[in-house]
Structure formats: C-alpha cells, structure tokens
Image (cartoon, helix red, strand yellow):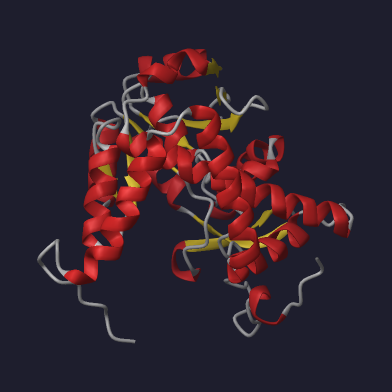
Amino acid sequence: MAKRVYPTHTWHPRYWPTHAVILLLKLLAWLPWPLKISTGRMIGRLAYLFARQRRHYTEINIALCFPEKTPQQQRELVKESFISNGIGLVEVATCLVRDVSELKERVTFLGREHMDKALAQGKGVLVLGAHFSMLDLGGALHTLFYPGDAIYKPHKNPVMDAFIQQGRLKHYEQMVPQKDLKALVRRIRQGKAVWYSPDQDFGRKVSVFAPFFGVTAASVTMTARIAKMTGAPVLPLRMHRNPDQRSYTLEYLPPLENFPSDDALQDATRVNQVLEQMIRLHPEQYLWMHRRFKTQADPSLASPYKHRSSRL
C-alpha cells in the first residue's frame, strides 16, 4: 500500500474536513458541563450503533477478558465502554482547547506519597499508565499536581497533529515521540516524570507473550528496558471518572519492587498484572476498541478478530 502523501498547505481543500472536526472539538470544549456529558453519552451511543468494526473488536476483547460474565453482562459492558469513551472524546476536546486548572478542586488524588518519594530519589520517574477513556484529561489534571512529559504517537494528518500537539503542550513540559527512545531516556535522567502506556499490541518484534486478563498477549518489553537504562522507579497511575460524572480520582500505586529483573517475560507479566489491576476497578472506562490480541504467539494462527464470531 502506497504511503499517503499530505499537501503542505494547511488550508488545502483536503484538510477542510479536518478543520471542521477541529471546530467541532472547540465547540464541544466550551459546552456547559452537564450538556458536555450528555453530548458525550450520545456520541458513545451513536458510535456503538455505527462503528461496527470497533464494536466487533470490543465485543471480542470483552468476551476474551471476562469469560466469567454472562453474554448479557458482556453486552452491557460493551455499551458502557462506548458511552464512557464518548464522554472521553468530549474530555479530550476540553483539555486540548481549555485551561483545566479550574477542575483541580474536582480531583481526588490518592497515593501522592509514592510520587513524592520517587521524585526525591532524583532519578526521574516512569509513570505507568493505561488507555483509559479519560486518559488525555487525566494526564492534564495530573500536571496540575506534578509537571511532566508524555510519550505520543504523531498523527498522520499534519493539521490534526499540530492541533493535538498544541493542545497537549498546554499541560506537559514536552511530548516525546513514541519511537524516540534516546529522548525518553534523556528526559528521565534529567529527573523528569514521563508518562508511558504499554497496554497495546505493537507486534512480535518488540514483544514477549505474557498473560493479560488470562489471555496470552503480545506485551512490549520497553517498560523494563527503560527502567534498566535509567534506574528510575516505575510508578503505576490509575484514574477514573467518578459516578457523579463531574469529578475524578487519580491514584498512584506503590512502585514496582525489584523491577526490572533479568527475565523479560517475568517483567512483562508483572506489568500486565498491574495494568489489569488498574483496569478492573472500572472496566467500562477502558479503551477496549483496539485489537489487543491481534498478534498470536503461534504465527500460524489468525487474529481472533478475523474469524472468531461474536458471542454478544
């Protein structure tokens, strides 16, 4: 497949739909909070109805990760996940466009003693996160308490990428490109806290196969590599939207002890266990829409998303 080439002029007609999306995000950001949440819920419900491929991925993930749930419970979790991520889209718009400092009083931040102790060591901190629906807003809220950096994957569309980067730099000190390991290590060695989320399938070459919700999954080894290269503590951070739909809880868990080891599989398993622990608190607020299990340990086996029929 040929690589898509984008025009250099940012107002080229090809970018007009992108500018329309950006305008919509700006409008969503300024809605009153109750209307913002109801709009997000509506977006989630519409996505559930019309984003059939993403719904299929979500159904397969939920069926694999929660076999103890009945089919009806699984269906409800799929719907709740779409609604939560619809709200998450409006939260993304809010933190990309607006100053979120007015939301600080709505944040309950638990486990801060773990971060304070980690920063006092002077080795920087690798913040271990997951793709929660409120990830972008959660990261912005986190910087109201602790400055830091985040790793990002550049958007292929340069106009959208510029908008996202401009919005995120309102909150983070630096955005470190996902593939720039040297920059990441350098920032940690400078004593910075850098946010890293290793909960997606990045393929066989950079992974070992470790259990995630009891399912063998391609799991990146980068968390352990970064910790080994920097000597920085690895500090898990979980977050969730509270039931009132207007306040949030962030919580640092204790740092991973005796990490990394000399066993890549053991280290990846530990990371997955922590991620699972964080996700299980509010599983509906996790991004189940990506193909977490697309790479199989046995290369002769196809991805479960290709030929496994939905149970839901």
Residue under the point 57% across and 71% down: 295
Work out whether residue 256 can be spotted.
Answer: no
Residue 1 picture quarter: bottom left
In the image, residue 192 sits, relative to residue 108, either above or below, namely below
204 with respect to 299 (left or right)? left
Q: Give the image location of residue 152, x and y in percent.
A: 34, 49
Residue 4 picture quarter: bottom left
In the image, residue 150 sits, relative to residue 114, either above or below, namely below
Give 43 or 85, whichever is nearer the viewer.
43
Give 253 or 141, whichever is nearer the viewer.
141
Work out whether residue 160 can be spotted.
Answer: yes
Residue under the point 65% across and 41% down: 279
In the image, residue 249 sits, relative to residue 53, either above or below, namely above
Q: Give the image location of residue 257, x and y in percent.
A: 56, 30
Q: Give the image location of residue 165, x and y in percent.
A: 25, 45
Q: Residue furthest left?
A: 9
Give 306 or 190, whichever is nearer the viewer.
306
